[in-house]
């Protein structure tokens, strides 16, 4: 299928740029991810022809299995997958990393010296060894499934991959016949079968020709079963020839047992040292270790997902201490949900400088791409996502100049409307709810009231030790409390990293005593031991120390951070100050000579940074926290200053970043700048009726104002903040406390002669009195506000005061006077609009 033909079905998030490759069961396209701006590859099942119609479901299952396999893997020599979904026609696709102008291993190896060919083969072996440790058989190893770019090998196409514990006799031949071992022709496939295919690839790469007649099916079949490849034709040393010959034995029992054994003999045969275990390779075993110890919790969430698919939604709180495995449980459920056809959307709360409704911003961006929206919906979204228009090509936008929309009222209803319009179930992931702002929590609470009537599953994670009250506040959500791993699960996790030797009782006891079952700590302890022993395979045989580190988990975290080279550490410090999620543009403005690609790869190789949903961030909060702890006070303050100054330069409207700037200027120790941006952030929150968040910012302004001898500008600011705080408290229902703040604002205004503050305080006191039914006081306050507004020629305040005076008179049943006041209000509004 050509790209033009496929555009009828394309996903709203991904825009096709060109067709990369096409096969009988699938096409691969180069596409633009409109949400992240990144170029990625999209693999889609091709149109099922008449001859394949009956196999359509099998093809879909194959693609789903390929994604599910790849999504659990992380290795430098295995292609990475990012997303899975269905187009408008119901065809599945998945998104993977894009490799620019790759060659197959055969193409890349043509005319290269033997040493360079061996180097590529060793990379394939590293990937295959990793797969087998994870109990996965590739099942279709061949040159076209091994790509090379810039000397880096990438193994791909896992559609036929199977787990060793799920092996069953096959009724038909799977894989490409020229690389299929003899036993596979009778339905048997094992680790030795992958090794036979590896041997075929090696033979073809070294000789630059296949040993058999690939073009003739019957001849090829006979040769696979009966003939031995001509090893002498390779023209290599006898030792190397023997390695390849053993790989290509007809009987699986006569081949090597493991990839590790092959690598040892191959290196000896060519006089090459055994490959070092790079940090990147080591982390592939540590980061993507087997998912263990959470079977009950996972099955519970799978059942909740099944219920959501059936139309009965639910919401779950996943609680536990930092490092206990909350994120891994959610990731496993995310992969399962994608394969089941659900849309999965993730929101992240942050600990510092979060914008209004921070956790909902990315979720709303994703939903905006999936859902037809009317102009009013877009107007609401633009208040949170300024660039939303760029995501919505043909959606009309309401640009009318009218009063601000109350996001606290409109967001829940907008979310519900969008969710009601989804054609597939939706999984909403809300991470780190212990940091979530009050207003964002209110949106979640509103959503929970309707969750059971929608095909949605909400998963929220939080650190139970940092927000012990959260479960009570979200009582409508079911609780899943993750405890530390028991010894049996520790042994299972250890074995998935180190092999069978990782289950030795002494070693498991050591891990249990050292880490008390905290998953993050277990992995970091194993990493530390691997650093001491030289490679992971030697860890369980080494003499165990009494303790890994006298400093506990923070000492281990610092040891891991120390693996980042010195020339990359300054940028990492800056990144830690910026926040858990990286802003590359912000980082490079502070470190202008940074080689970003080198730096990202260096930090990823040290397992400090990783990519999620196309965004780089710290691999774990503890790593960022450890980086911040390592900074001296003056150094940290200076970095926060640099971040704040860069935000002001990079963003055309720095006020949009007011919340972040208030935080960074605060941490830089600049009270004046913190005060300036905290006031702006408070006003922004107030304008969209996020009153609780507004009060938090206004309190920060008050805290930064001098107690003694304030100047006139500071007095005015104090009065304005007290006025706004009082109004916000009244809107939240705390009328008496709000009126107290307003009276303080009035007193400051009268003392200082600040008529603007007096006018606003009188008006708001009048509105408060009206709210509680004290109409005489309301009338007096509003009349005084009107008098001053008229003196100041403040048309908006005049109109507002007239409107509420009319409302007071109407409640006092003075209807003619009330009508006159309202008409005067409307006259001012019309005159203002005409201007």
Image (cartoon, rainbow, N blue to C red):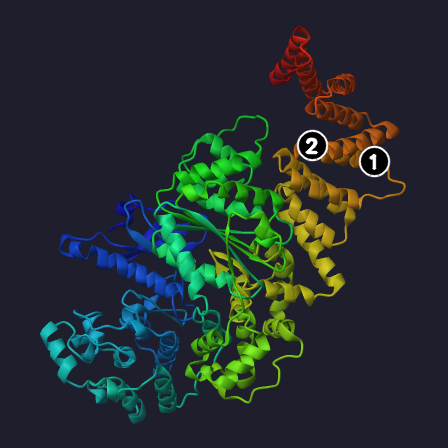
Q: Residue at x 40, y 35 (%)?
A: 394
Quarter of the rendering containing residue 324: bottom right
The residues tagged by marks 1 and 2 sit, at their Cα atoms, a distance apart of: 23 Å
Furthest toward the bottom, the residue is 238
Question: For the C terminus, which image quadrant?
Answer: top right
Question: Residue 599 versus residue 402: which sits nearer the camera?
Answer: 402
**Residue 730 circle label:** 2
- Which one is earlier in the sequence, the residue at label 1 or at label 2? 1
Pointer 1 local density, CA inside 10 Å: few below 14, some 14–19, many at least 20: many
Q: In this view, does 58 lie above or below 825?
A: below
Q: Which residue is drawn at 45% across and 60% down?
A: 331
Q: In this view, does 795 lie above or below 489?
A: above
Q: Residue at x 71, y 26 (%)?
A: 768
In the image, 790: left or right of 378?
Answer: right
In the image, 242: left or right of 826?
Answer: left
Point out residue 411 in the picture as x, y percentages from the top left corner.
52, 37
Q: Name the residue under label 1.
A: 715
Point out residue 739 in the picture as x, y percentages from the top left corner.
76, 31
Residue 532 appears in the picture as rendered: yes
Question: Residue 772 versus residue 628: which sits nearer the camera?
Answer: 772
**Residue 58 circle label:** none
Pointer 2 local density, CA inside 10 Å: few below 14, some 14–19, many at least 20: many
Q: Which residue is drawn at 30% across and 79% down?
A: 191
Where disc 1 sits, the SS reads helix
Q: Do the residues labelled 1 and 2 touch (CB within 8 Å)?
A: no
In the image, 667: left or right of 6?
Answer: right
Where disc 2 sits, the SS reads helix
Residue 332 appears in the picture as rendered: no
Point out residue 545 in the picture as x, y percentages from the top left corner.
60, 86
Q: In this view, does 735 lie above or below 481?
A: above
């Amino acid at each position: 299928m050509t790209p033009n033909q496929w555009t009828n079905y394309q996903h709203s998030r991904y825009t096709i740029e060109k067709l990369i490759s096409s096969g009988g069961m699938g096409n691969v396209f180069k596409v633009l991810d409109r949400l992240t701006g990144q170029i990625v590859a999209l693999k889609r099942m091709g149109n099922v022809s008449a001859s394949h119609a009956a196999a359509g479901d099998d093809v879909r299952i194959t693609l789903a299995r390929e994604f599910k396999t790849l999504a659990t893997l992380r290795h430098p020599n295995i292609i990475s997958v990012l997303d899975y979904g269905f187009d408008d026609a119901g065809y599945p696709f998945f998104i993977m990393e894009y490799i620019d102008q790759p060659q197959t291993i055969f193409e890349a190896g043509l005319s290269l010296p033997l040493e360079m060919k061996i180097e590529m083969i060793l990379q394939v072996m590293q990937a295959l060894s990793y797969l087998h440790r994870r109990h996965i058989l590739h099942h279709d190893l061949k040159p076209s499934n091994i790509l090379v770019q810039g000397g880096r090998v990438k193994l791909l196409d896992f559609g036929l991959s199977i787990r060793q514990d799920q092996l069953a006799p096959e009724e038909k031949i799977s894989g490409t016949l020229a690389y299929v071992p003899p036993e596979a022709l009778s339905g048997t496939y094992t680790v030795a079968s992958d090794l036979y295919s590896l041997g075929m690839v090696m033979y073809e790469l070294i000789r630059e020709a296949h040993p058999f007649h690939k073009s003739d099916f019957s001849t090829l079949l006979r040769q696979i079963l009966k003939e031995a490849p001509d090893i002498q034709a390779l023209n290599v040393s006898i030792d190397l020839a023997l390695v390849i010959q053993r790989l290509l034995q007809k009987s699986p029992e006569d081949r090597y047992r493991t990839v590790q054994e092959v690598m040892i003999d191959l290196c000896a045969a060519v006089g090459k040292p055994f490959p070092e275990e790079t940090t990147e390779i080591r982390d592939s075993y540590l980061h993507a270790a087997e998912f263990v110890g959470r079977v009950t919790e996972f099955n519970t969430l799978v059942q909740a997902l099944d219920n959501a698919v059936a139309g009965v939604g639910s919401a779950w709180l996943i609680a536990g201490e930092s490092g206990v495995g909350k994120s891994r449980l959610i990731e496993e459920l995310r992969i399962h949900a994608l394969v089941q056809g659900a849309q999965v959307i993730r929101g992240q709360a942050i600990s510092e400088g979060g914008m209004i409704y921070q956790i909902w911003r990315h979720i709303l961006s994703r939903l905006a791409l999936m859902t037809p929206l009317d102009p009013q919906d877009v107007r609401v979204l633009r208040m949170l996502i300024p660039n939303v228009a760029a995501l919505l090509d043909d959606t009309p936008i309401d640009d009318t100049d009218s009063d601000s929309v109350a996001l606290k009222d409109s967001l829940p209803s907008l979310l519900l409307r969008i969710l009601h319009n989804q054609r597939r179930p939706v999984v909403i992931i809300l991470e780190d709810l212990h940091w979530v702002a009050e207003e964002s929590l209110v949106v979640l609470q509103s959503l929970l009231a309707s969750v059971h009537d929608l095909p949605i599953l909400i998963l929220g994670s939080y650190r139970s030790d940092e927000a012990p009250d959260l479960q009570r506040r979200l009582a409508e959500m079911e609780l899943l409390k993750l405890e530390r791993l028991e010894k049996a699960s520790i042994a299972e996790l250890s074995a998935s990293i180190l092999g069978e030797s990782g289950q030795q009782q002494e070693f498991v006891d050591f891990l249990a005593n050292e880490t008390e079952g905290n998953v993050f700590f277990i992995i970091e302890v194993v990493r530390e031991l691997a650093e001491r022993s030289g490679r992971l395979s030697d860890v369980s045989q080494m003499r165990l120390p009494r303790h890994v580190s006298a400093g506990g988990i923070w000492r281990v975290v610092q040891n891991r951070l120390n693996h980042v080279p010195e020339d990359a550490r300054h940028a990492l410090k800056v990144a830690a100050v910026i926040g858990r999620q990286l802003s590359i543009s912000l980082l490079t403005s502070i470190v202008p000579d940074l080689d970003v690609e080198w730096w990202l790869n260096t930090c990823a190789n040290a397992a400090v940074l990783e990519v999620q949903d196309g965004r780089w961030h710290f691999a774990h909060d503890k790593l960022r926290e450890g980086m911040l702890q390592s900074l001296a006070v003056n150094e940290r303050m200076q970095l926060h200053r640099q971040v704040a100054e860069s935000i002001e330069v990079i963003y055309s409207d720095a006020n949009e970043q007011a919340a972040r700037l208030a935080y960074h200027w605060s941490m830089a120790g600049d009270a004046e700048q913190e005060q300036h941006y905290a006031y702006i952030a408070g006003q922004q929150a107030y304008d969209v009726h996020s009153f609780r968040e507004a009060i938090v910012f206004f309190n920060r302004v008050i805290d930064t104002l001098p107690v003694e001898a304030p100047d006139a500008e500071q007095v005015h600011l104090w009065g304005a903040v007290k006025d706004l705080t009082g109004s916000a408290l009244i809107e939240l229902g705390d009328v008496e406390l709000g009126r107290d703040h307003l009276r303080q604002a009035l007193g400051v205004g009268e003392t200082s002669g600040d008529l603007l503050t007096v006018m606003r305080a009188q008006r708001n006191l009048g509105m408060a009195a009206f709210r509680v039914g004290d109409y005489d006081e309301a009338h007096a306050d509003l009349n005084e506000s009107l008098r001053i507004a008229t003196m100041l020629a403040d048309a908006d305040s005049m109109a507002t005061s007239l409107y509420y005076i009319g409302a007071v008179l109407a409640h006092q049943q003075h209807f003619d006077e009330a009508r006159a006041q309202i008409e005067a209000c409307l006259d001012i509004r019309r005159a203002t609009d005409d201007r």
